[in-house]
Image (spheres, rainbow, N blue to C red):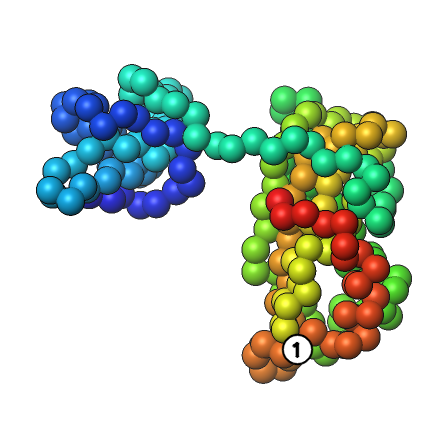
Amino acid sequence: MVADGVKVLAEAPSNHSSSALSSAKANAHAHAHSVHFRIDDSGEERGTIKTLISSQSPREHRSIRLPHLVAAMPRIPPPLRTSFPYLHPVQTRWSDNDVYGHLNNVVYYLFFDTTVNRYLIENSGLDPTGTSPIGLVVETGCQYFSSISFPDEVHVGLRVAEIGRSSVRYELAVFREQEVEASATGHFVHVYVDRESRRPTPVPEKLQKILRPLLGIATAA
């Protein structure tokens, strides 16, 4: 049985009790959250828990952790400043901090968007309001290593992992002040489409030319 899907967070051993699984499913459905269960070849339900279940309402917030959960999110080491050929300075703002006193996670995606498009505008003459084709974001992600807060100044590193027929995969990292290791790293994929029809189109040669210098030292995120 599979409830509404979310990212894999943890995994329980296969001898997990059926009562615990039933309780987890009940809580997941009752609170519109989700948990995954695996059906093996014999048709039996096994205890592979692929999310932590949380119950959240205006009056309560609690998390249910089934026994023996093991963290399953792989971690990569923070990339270094020297592995990014383009660095864009960004001044954090008062409004970037959230209630916990550090930059909210969504701010990093603004950094990514700003840095990629700043590079394209500076080097290819991109006019976001008039040129065609245009790059649409189809995938993005971020992994965090350490906190950043206003009034820190950051540098956003940019490199290109791959140039496809109609897509470009960028890799980015956010560096606090003059630190060598990134506070966060992520990726960003553009698919180029015709402005009017929104159909995929080859990455323009002019764009490929200014992106090639960012290739070579990129590694998969």
Q: In the image, is 119 to the left or to the right of 12?
A: right
Q: Which quarter of the image is occupied by the C terminus?
A: top right
Q: Identify the amino acid type marked 1.
A: Pro
Q: Which of 199 and 45 lies nearest the eye of the viewer? A: 45
Percent coordinates x, y for residue 220 in the rendering: 63, 48
Q: Is 187 rendered above or below residue 132?
A: above
Percent coordinates x, y for residue 67 in the rendering: 29, 17
The quarter holding residue 22 reads: top left
SS type, badge 1: loop
Q: Which quarter of the image is occupied by the N terminus?
A: top left
State whether residue 26 appears in this view. no
The residue labelled by disc 1 is 202
Q: Residue at x 16, y 22 (%)?
A: 17
* Furthest residue in direction front, as rendered: 216
Q: Is 170 rendered above or below residue 53?
A: below
Percent coordinates x, y for residue 57 in the rendering: 37, 28
Q: Residue at x 59, y 76 (%)?
A: 200
Q: Which of 176 and 31 lies nearest the eye of the viewer? A: 176
Q: Is 13 rendered above or below residue 125?
A: above
Q: Residue at x 24, y 38 (%)?
A: 37
